[in-house]
Image (spheres, rainbow, N blue to C red):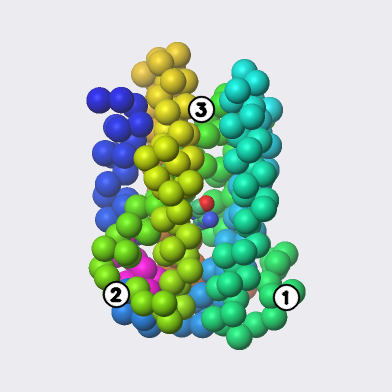
Amino acid sequence: MSFSQSLIQDAQPYLEANKQNAFIQDVINDQLTVDALNYYIQQDLRYADAETIVQTQLIAKSKTISDQRLFADQLSAHLRTVNDLFESLTKNVGRDWSTQRYQPIQPMTFLYREHILSQARDGSLIDVLAPFEAGIWMYIELGKYLKATNRIKPDNKFYTWVQDVQDPALAGPTGISNHFMKVIDREAKYLDDQRLTLVKENFLRSCLLEWYFWEAANKQLTWVDFERSAFKNDGSGLL
Ligand SMILES: Cc1ncc(CO)c(N)n1
């Protein structure tokens, strides 16, 4: 089994948990609230900005021109399209698009951004790529899952998202996700087991943070909630 196959295998419980998350189930039942969707849009825009930074790191850490071109082309595609999906989703929450970008970064977004950015200084290419690719892989798998339900109709508030994450350029056999997995496998050959374990841990941690990202949107968790929970101090917990 290749290293990327073992990542996908070990990520299955996380994928299942993401499928069962209330946000995804609400999409299936067409019950996604405007508040949850709006929070998701605003926070994912901030995640997408971290993805931009990650992709500049991928270029910087590449050892060949051909890798640099792969990541530069993907960064360019990201920057060309990053607003389109969110602008389209914003139509479903009755807000003005001009107010959606650069909203405060809330706790789970902060945590997940820090996670994918954490390899920027000392990590090598595979360390930066794996936690970033995990998010892409998760989105593609959730897109397949949602499509397979046959219940996401064009008037569903999340319809455009489901369509977008199935784009063959992203999710197809020769799409960018498989391409990134191939780079991970190529680089994995140079690492010992101890290093591979760390790469896998970071891949799986992204899959875990995906679940928390949906959950934060379900509950629209803010720093104020974090403070309230801390100051209350009654053992009732956060989530
Ligand atoms: C939280 C999150 N994970 C993954 C992706 C896919 O790029 C995204 N846009 N947002």
Quarter-of-image position of residue 144: bottom left
Let me know if residue 191 is in the magenta part: no
Image coordinates for residue 164, horizontal then vertical, percent: 48, 60
Crowding near the residue tagged with mark 1, few <14, some 14–19, many ≥20 C-alpha atoms within 10 Å: few
Residue 99: give its label. 1
The reply to whether dot 2 and dot 1 touch (C-beta < 8 Å) is no
Foreground label between 2 and 3: 2
Which residue type does callout 2 highlight?
Arg
Let me know if residue 20 is in the magenta part: yes
Q: Which residue is drawn at 63% across and 38% down?
A: 73
Which residue type does callout 3 highlight?
Ile
Q: Residue at x 39, y 45 (%)?
A: 172
Residue 125: give its label. none
Precedes in sequence: disc 2 or disc 3: 3
Between 213 and 166, the one lying in front of the other is: 166
Task: Decide if residue 41 is on the left or right side of residue 11.
Answer: right
Q: Which residue is drawn at 60% across and 23% down?
A: 66
Residue 126: give its label. 3
Q: Residue at x 45, y 14 (%)?
A: 190
Task: Decide if residue 67 is on the left or right side of residue 103.
Answer: left
Image coordinates for residue 158, horizontal then vertical, percent: 45, 72
Between 134 and 212, the one lying in front of the other is: 134
Magenta-highlighted residues: 19-27
Image coordinates for residue 43, horizontal then vertical, percent: 60, 64
Residue linked to disc 2: 151
